[in-house]
Amino acid sequence: MAVHPLVSPWGRFGLYSFFIDAPEPAIVDTGIASSPAEGMVPALEAIGRRIEDVRWILLTHGHIDHIGGAHALWELTGRRAQVVIHEADAPMLRSRRAHVDEYLAGRGQYLNDPGGEAGLAAAANAVISGELEPDVLVRGGEKISLGGDVTVSVHSIPGHTAGSVAYVLDGQNDVFVGDAVQVHGAANGFPGFVDPAGYRSSLNYLRDTVRPRHLYLGHPYRRADGTPYGVELDAVQAREALQGSLDIEARVSGAARGALAAGLQDTDSPYSPFAGAAEELGYQGDPCLEPSPFFTTLHGYRTTLDHTTEDEELRAHG
């Protein structure tokens, strides 16, 4: 099956979706509210395809820039396409408010932005085309038929979000992972994930078990020198990006653990209370650039280690 990247305009950057030219055509990820009309329709017309014929909308995870256009795309298919998402990320498809709650529970507590909640609520209203109940909830292990003998396997790869999934085009081993392989992150130069252990495990699983022939990324993630990968990686590039992501996670993990062991302190640093980790990593990016992967990721380590300590104390006191 042919796979066509579809790029939609979004500020200085593009948002990427992927068209699988199967008997029952599928689009992987949907950008924001404007993406289907402004990006997907003309891109499909250029290859002689129609958005009305899309029958599957496969969502890799629940972030705004991947599910924001889902309702609009569904409408353009005459509401005939089936929408698929992992059950853990489904609340972000069903409710704009879920994105605000995620912000408040995580990175929002470090950003010291009194208008942050209102700002994110406004962004969710602007770029999410509509709240939508998914047709198919997955957990990993399912197979989805795209007509004829074409199937897609669903693999759970938590880390970037709890409900991140990989869709594998069976027989071709083309693998769509959304934002689950971060390398050095995108424009802000830092990898973003909420579950460090899940992220590490998922990268190992993709590298050693799935072993993509082609790896399709949600954004042009960057190498250590700042040069971006494309969004379509061959087998050699895929292995390099996966191993690079693991190497970077190990460095971030060491810095996070060191900062937490030293004790978190509020300071004047923009990286507070994780200034020690930023210094050890030599990170000088903007930690407040939304969606703020620096604070998202460091909060993930803090949460994980706090829970580990609690479990150890419970076991010690029997």
Image: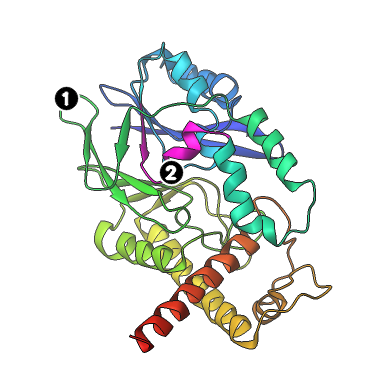
Could you tell me residue 169's position as x and y percent? Answer: 27, 40
| Above-or-below relation of 143 to 310 | above
What type is the residue that disc 2 sits on? Asp
Residue at the image position 41 percent from the left and 17 percent from the top: 49
In reply to whether residue 92 is colored magenta, the answer given is yes
Report the residue marked by disc 1. 148
Q: Which is more toward the observer, 123 or 76?
A: 123
Residue extending furthest top? 78
| Above-or-below relation of 34 to 122 | above
What type is the residue that disc 1 sits on? Gly
Q: Which is more toward the observer, 71 or 110?
A: 110
Left or right of 155? Residue 51 is right
Magenta residues, start to end? 83-96
Task: Judge depth for marks 2 and 1 and give the one in front.
Answer: 2
| Above-or-below relation of 86 to 312 | above
Q: Quadrant of the N terminus?
A: top left
Residue at the image position 50 percent from the left and 34 percent from the top: 67
Left or right of 97? Residue 282 is right
| Quadrant of the rendered image containing residue 282 | bottom right
Label 1 residue SS? loop
In reply to whether residue 95 is colored magenta, the answer given is yes
Residue extending furthest left? 149
First along the sequence among labels 2 and 1: 2
Residue at the image position 80 percent from the left and 72 percent from the top: 269
Residue 89: mark? 2
